[in-house]
Image: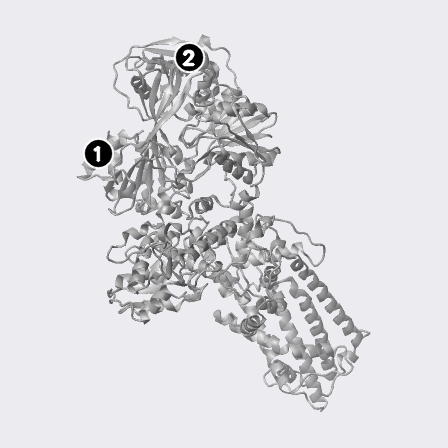
Amino acid sequence: MPRIFAYIVHKAGVADDSAAELLAAAAKIDAAQSPTAVVTGHGADLDAVCQSLCASFREVWRIGNESLAYPNAELVRKALAAVVPAGSILLVPHAHFGTDLSPGLSIKLNAAYVPDVLDIESAGGGALKMVRQEFGGQVSAHVRCDISSGAVINIRPGAFKPAASPPAGGQVIDQSARVGVLTCGRRYLQTVAAETGDVDIKKYPALVSIGRGIQEQDNVSIAQELADAMGAAVSCSRPVVDAKWMEKSRQVGSSGQTVKPKVYMACGISGSFQHLAGIQGSPFIVAINKNPKAPIFRVADVGIVADLLEFLPELTSKIRGK
Amino acid sequence: MVEAIQPPAQATYWFVHGRLLFLIVDLLGLASFAWIMAKRLAPLFRGQRDPRFDRPLVRLGRLLKFWLGQWRHPRYLAAGLIHILLFAGFIVLVVHTGFLLALGTSERPNMPGGVYAAISDYAVTVVFLCMMIAIVRRLLKPARYAVPARYGKAHTADAILLLALIAILMAADSIFEGAQAASQWQQRLPVDALAIGSLPWVLRNALLSAPLPALANLYLGAYLVHELAFFFLLCYRPFGIQFHVETSLFTVYFAKLDRGTIKPVRWGVPDAQLDQVKSLGVKTFEDFTWKHMLDFYSCADCGRCSDQCPANAVGRPLSPRFLTIKARDYSFRHFPVFGSAHNGHALVGDIYSEDEIWSCTTCGACEAECPLLVEYIDKIVDLRRGLVDDGKVPQSLQKPLKALETRGNPFGKMEKKRADWVKAIPQQACSAQTLNGDHRAETLYFVDSITAYDDRMQAIGRATARILHAADENFGILGAVEKDSGHDVRRFGEETLFMALRDHNTEAIKESGVKRIVTSDPHAFNALKHDYRDVPPVEHISQFMARAMADGKIRLNPVESGQVYTYHDPCYLGRHNGVYDAPRAVLDAVPGLQRVEMRRSRDRSFCCGGGGLALFYEPTENERMGVKRVQMAAEAGANVIVTACPFCMVNMEDAIKVAGMEGKMTAIDLAELVERQMTN
Amino acid sequence: MEILVCAKRVPDTSENEIELNGDGDIDRDELVYSVNEADNYAVEEALEIVERTGGTVTVVTVGGDEDEEILRREMAMGARQAVLLSDDAFNGSDGRGIAAILAAFVKKGHYELILTGVQADDGAGQVGGMLAAMLDCPFASLVTSIEVLGGGKLKISREIEGGNKEINEIDLPCVLSIQTGINEPRYVGMRGIRQVASVPIPTLGKADLGVNGYAGEAAARVKRMDYFVPPAGKGAEMLTGSQDEVIAKLIDLLKAKGGLQ
């Protein structure tokens, strides 16, 4: 089995949760191996991350370079191509950075590439068998990957449950010198933060979606509190927009946004075809509705007959309590 | 008559001999008018062809009814009466005015006498009084005259100027006659008879003791004022809304005869050759047909269309009145009387906005109201065709259009599931079988997309099937082979897709061998009746039920007491097809059913919000049409609103929830109601 | 600017119900196909750019005769040229293979900007990045806006977490993968497609392109074995019990499904 590396995404000196998921994925590939963390960045933040990773990785490869202070995938790719040994398996979290980095990286490393993987097992004979989804999540597929020249594998966030592992007592190995001067044809300028009126509901892994059952504008805050507690965003169905309780950009539906979250809380939403058409990728749908005959219960995974105005605040406080 | 004062033709006006002066005034006036008319007609010759010369007898009949008979005017009673009087006065005065004009240049002046003269006197008086009332109305300003800021300044000043000029014309005429009669009286000559109580009579009495020279001056001066005012008005009218005085006869004569259907993309170009036409629809002004351009000229700015327009009422950017006025102003600017013509600008993006054009539900309230029979729907559809041709279709409509193209229904559901709604009909009730080699029938139940696929509306399909069965009607459905009727695809400007759907369905209907069609969907009803050719006759389920109940084939149980019902006329059943009484007869035949009529009913019915593709479009509006409609039902004292259209049902049920009227109002389809009450 | 857009013909997810056929594949009998939605946005973006800067838009796809229909549709939309890359030897290519075929085509022409859609029916989103690496030019994914600066540069915006936007400057020639919603694509109807029905679409094969050894089934290193559907229940599982019990159960489920961040 080739050597397994895990690319760690981090922000402000803290490693992303995906690091633990990559460990779990690596264990499925080769339970006997302890993967090596690879981290790029610059300065004190990079140092902090590398130190923290020593608790779960035996080896942490540090690649520090001034031009890597902001994670520009073009530069990171060049750095990794210089450092990661040929034939390795590199695990990367599949998110906006991973999709930017990995396809090109696989070419530079002459490795195979499999994106957005939900499950892995060894297939023997220099191959891995993986599970992916296609058609907007409507079907799953088994995929066979020839890893004899290595592979870059993007792991879907949330697909692999981190296991509690004993402290690894790892060490940081600095690989910065192996990377020369880094330049590329793409230069980072700035990040423009989303305005509060500009929440892009498509980007959230969980949505608390409200319908007419919310009854009035003042009650929208009930949904917002739940969303905050869940790390989700509030979206809605058309009647809520028509009533001007929420902006159009929050609307999920055939004439609104199409969303592909992992979890969709349909609160006081009846489940009209126009609304459901906006939900793709077969998320886990929780339906909360006063009316036990609401069509939403046919498509939801889990249903709760309750008055959302009472139920949601309770749920919020219990989530916060945990 | 005996001239007491020297006639104008023989008098001298400031060193100019009268006859010469008036010859010049007449010639200048007529020449100017001819020039102006030529300039106004010019764009019509550049417009698209529009065959309106057929069926002259029918057209003549409508001319008598709508133009001469002012048929539509009393719908707004106060303004209508004023206009009827005014119009009658104008018609009466045509001959009188002709003689008056001739007076200025003739050797032997002559005016008609006798009964006609008396009637003319009253006509002048009535017109004068109407002008006074009209001016006051313009100042008090009914709401529909208002000009929203985005459309420019108010039209009040211009309107009052024109009204005042007509009043001056009448006054001058009256002074002319009154002065003559007063002079005759003073000189003890035979006095021209003036109708008692008329304005000339009043003025004569007032002038009885005026000095003779003063009377002579008044007489000659009034004539000059009359001539100048007459020709000024003649030449000024084509610059504004009063142009309808000249054009109304033609606009009404050439008005559209075929209700319910949309004009072809290009008259004279058969469907098969449309691919060769480079540009479809109306993009620039010259893409309008000459009749549509004539409509723009003929608008009297009365605002009745916009007053009735449901889109306007809910704050959408559409006002039919201003659709016309803006186009008229555009044509005045780009085809001016002074200066050269220039065309070629895209109208949408200039005088019209895209949202404005997509906001129309084609309900037809505007066309039903306009006293001049100005047409709107064809123009909107033509503008939409232009937008579609340029790819400018709102994203919200692109998805259903694509679904219609690939799956034959706007929901994107699979063709093979189109007849699945049948499966939920209770076994013992009946079945709706698909017509094919094994099963044939005389009657086709054309279901159409929403009734076939929408979970809620499938109930209407099942109710209709049960009713047909109970009335011993041998019927079948097309099943998976049926595609959307395409009714609203056409009205939203996608003619090519419409033709594909129409041809497919026509073929399927012919193959089924049915002799008649019945449908519960007024949009399908309208399409099959007016847009499709070569298909068997079609009727709506309400008509079928009315007949079946009259024949005793369907018997009904009494309804529960405590409910008050009101019937909402769907636009495509009522206004566009005149089916008002059959649904009411059905309701009235239900024992114990208490029915009230909403204030706006029959051809004044208020659109529910639109059907077909209108369900998908996201307009800018202040509230939903459906909400206003259920509030009207509540105002009428009803707690059940009955409708006969699945799209109306979607909008009503939605509106009841949005308006917070759950528990206070329910909506039910006519077929569902009958099925519920059926004894068999 | 000469722009190339790489497009793919895919089953239309909004109008199909994807079902398995019992043989490990999906039932393809009643699928309707269309151009991948993100690719359509890319073509619209390309058209808007050339409307501002001049130049032409070329659309290319790797496939067979049945894929021509999407090329025609994009031409009806306004693309000046369309090219089909087709050869039996290309069948069974994995993502790297497709990218190699496209790279061979790109090298035969002069394109300043190459656009792909962010992802297609298989949700891989890989060809754009691979193509850029093979061509050795800069790449950016999830692009939500493009501004043409002078001097062979673009200013682009990328979509990152939380609705934020990452602004970059990128040198031409480059490859960008375009996110849906970047613009409002113009409508193309049956009539538009009929009007380009007889425009010739050149087809290039392996010999014309000189593709390296990455294309084709034998060279593919990633292969799909089968389709399957993980077992799911019928309708919602209704949670019952006291409100506290229901909430506790719900929280467990939310955690398991990744609903709590």
Q: In which quarter of the image is residue A106?
A: top left
Task: Name the amino acid type tagged 1.
Answer: Lys
Q: Residue A84 carries which label?
A: 2
* Camera sees residue B191: yes
The answer to whether residue C73 is left or right of residue A46 is right
Task: Name the amino acid type tagged 2.
Answer: Val
Vertical order, A142 against B124 (above or below): above
Query: Which residue sits furthest left?
Result: C241
Vertical order, B106 against C10 (above or below): below
Seen at 55% across and 23% down, the residue is: C207
- Secondary structure of the residue carrying tag 2 is loop
Rounded to the nearest whole Å, what is the CA distance between mark 1 and mark 2? 44 Å
Vertical order, B646 against A15 (above or below): below
Q: Quadrant of residue A298?
A: top left
Mark 1, other Cα within 10 Å: few <14 / some 14–19 / many ≥20: some
Q: Name the residue under label 1.
A: C249
Q: In which quarter of the image is residue B101?
A: bottom right
Q: Which mark is residue C157?
A: none
* Camera sees residue B356: no
> Do tags 1 and 2 sit on the same chain?
no
The one nearer the camera, A299 or B326, is A299
Mark 2, other Cα within 10 Å: few <14 / some 14–19 / many ≥20: some
The answer to whether residue C147 is left or right of residue B628 is right
- Secondary structure of the residue carrying tag 1 is helix
Q: Residue B195, how many percent across, how many down? A: 61, 85
Q: Residue A75, how many percent across, how many down? A: 48, 18
The answer to whether residue A110 is left or right of residue B128 is left
Q: How many numbered marks are there?
A: 2
Q: Which chain carries label 2?
A: A
Q: Which colour scheme is used?
A: one colour
Q: Residue B15, how many percent across, how many down? A: 82, 74
Seen at 25% across and 58% down, the residue is: B429
